[in-house]
Amino acid sequence: MAGLNLRSVLVTGANQGIGLGFVKQFLENSNPPEWVFATCQDPAGERMQELQNLAAKHQNLVIVALDVTDPASIKAAAARGETHLKGSGLNLLINNAGMAKLSTLESETPEDTALVYATNVTGPLLVSQAFLPLLKQAAQGSPQRGLSCSKAAIVNISSEGGSIQNVGGWHVVQIISYRCSKAALNMLTKCQALGYGGDGILSVAVHPGWVKTDMENSISVQQAPLTVEASVRGMLNVLATLSEKENGAFVNWEGKVLPW
């Protein structure tokens, strides 16, 4: 993570998998952010023990309730973040929360498609809108020129499964609504780059690789080759190198530019 110099970061879907991996590595850094906001749907729910243990050890870790499908919850989370940041703004927003439903072209349903889109596309849109004032504050208060993840950035965790050219893993699993949602998330990222770049905010879509997480294990019987730790370490190294040249780009955890 050399090269990233953050005062604040917020990660959605932070109680497990890649989101929790981000939180751990931010906290373990030799120069950790002053504030690490870890959001999840239910801070008192199941699968929260590890995140709660981290919060007990690190005073800079704040667990925030945030349901990316609930506009009221998103608004409340942004207000809580603003209270802690006291006018300094938010440097880095990582839209990590996501979901997939096992499906084929024949079995995909309107209900599952709506839920996946609400989580994977509308969620990042609304969360970014809610935290935009804080991202703008960070950009305006930064002495850095150009764009960078240390200044102010939106990072959308996407997937090569949403690449229209590559259609990664099609012969392993179809997951129609997931693929379509990630293609839409990529377009959202490009729109954010065009809309927010003038405010000093970098926007990028990142494919984390095929990672051993609960979501991956639920949609594929094959063994994912990447650990969460390796994926997150790679992504953080990539984020540290990004500038205005990559605004609106679609890259993977190794920094390779992926086709739309």
Image (cartoon, rainbow, N blue to C red):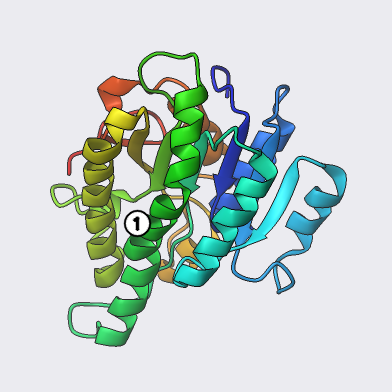
Q: Nearer the viewer, residue 215 or 195?
A: 195
Q: Please state if 96 lies on the left or on the right of 244 as rendered.
A: right
Secondary structure under the numbered disc 1 in the rendered image: helix
Image quadrant in which you'd find residue 178? bottom left
Q: Is residue 26 toward the left or the right of residue 246 in the image?
A: right
Which percent across, then down, holds residue 189?
28, 45
Residue 223 lies, with reference to residue 46, above or below; the image says above
Q: Is residue 175 visible?
A: no
Q: In the image, what residue occupies the spot 28% across and 54% down?
A: 185
Q: Amino acid at mark 1?
A: Leu
- Where is residue 99, by image quadrant? bottom left
State left or right for residue 215 relative to residue 168. right
Image quadrant holding the C terminus, namely top left
Residue at figure coordinates x 44%, y 56% from the top left:
127
Q: Which percent across, then down, holds residue 38?
A: 64, 52
Furthest toward the right, the residue is 57
Residue drawn at 59 percent across, 27 percent down: 6
The residue most toward the left is 165
Of the pair 199 and 21, the residue shown nearer to us: 199
Q: Is residue 115 above or below residue 228?
A: below
| In the image, residue 105 above or below residue 151 | below
In the picture, which quadrant includes the N terminus? top right
| Residue 186 rendering spot, x and y as whole percentages | 25, 49
**Residue 57 visible in the current orientation:** yes
Residue on which disc 1 sits: 125
> What residue appears at the point 60 percent right and 32 percent down from the top-left corner?
88
Spot occupied by residue 103 in the image (x, y as percentages of width and height): 30, 77
How many numbered callouts? 1
Q: Nearer the viewer, residue 39 or 173?
A: 39
How dense is the environment of label 1, judged by Cα within 10 Å: few (below 14), some, or many (20 and up)? Answer: some
